[in-house]
Amino acid sequence: MKKIVLGIILVILIIMTTGCVSSKQEANNLKTNNITEKDSDVEVTSEQITGIKITIDNKIYIINLENNNTVNEFVKLLPKEFEMKELNGNEKYVYMNDSLPTNASNPKKINAGDVMLYGNNCLVIFYKSFDTSYSYTRIGHIDNLPNLGNGSINVKIEK
């Protein structure tokens, strides 16, 4: 009788664990890191997203993400669409309805392609490099970002 009960429990456990496996392979080639943590005898595997897709005026780029709480909370809000306004001939910005946790610091130098949070809800994309005295929380970086021009831009950000 014990063998039958153990067999049934084993079958149920196998069914439950195979039902939890998901194939979240996105067709948009997002970069991810698998993180495995061991707590006692239980292994927990989670997926950390290291890159997300951003479409700027119908051109697709990848934001290479920082590993911080701000990014973790920002990714939970996606997908998002914004109209970002021009500022100072070097950046586009939008004040989001959502506030995010911050860990602001002065980077001293902004590089073209940097994506940052100013305050707790102002998303900024820099398209020119310059020195700064302002503090930001790093979100990520877009490689090879061109000059985004003088006007507003339409942006869609998604996982």
Image: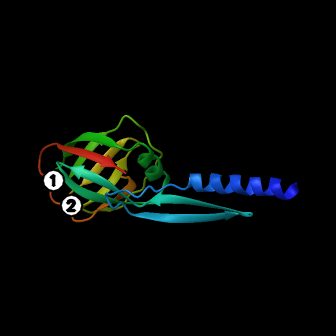
**Residue 67 in picture, x, y percent from top left:** 46, 60
Task: Check disc 2: other Cα within 10 Å, few if <14, some if 14-19, many if 20+.
Answer: some
**Residue 23 in picture, x, y percent from top left:** 46, 57
Residue 144 lies left or right of residue 78; in this view the side is left
* Residue drawn at 48 percent across, 59 percent down: 48
Occupied quadrant, residue 99: top left
Residue 58 lies left or right of residue 22; in this view the side is left
Quadrant of the snapshot with the N terminus = bottom right
Amino acid type at circle 2 is Leu
Whether residue 103 is visible to the viewer of this picture, yes or no, is: no
Which label is found at residue 145?
2
SS at badge 2 = loop
Amino acid type at circle 1 is Leu
Q: Nearer the viewer, residue 7 or 107?
A: 7
Q: Are marks 2 and 1 in contact (CB under 8 Å)?
A: yes
- What colour scheme governs how the chains and residues are painted in the rendered image of this protein? rainbow
* Residue drawn at 48 percent across, 45 percent down: 101
99 in relation to 53, above or below: above
Q: CA distance from mark 2 to mark 1?
A: 8 Å
* Residue drawn at 73 percent across, 57 percent down: 10
Q: Which residue is mark 1?
A: 148
39 in relation to 86, above or below: below
Going by the picture, which residue comes out furthest to the top? 97
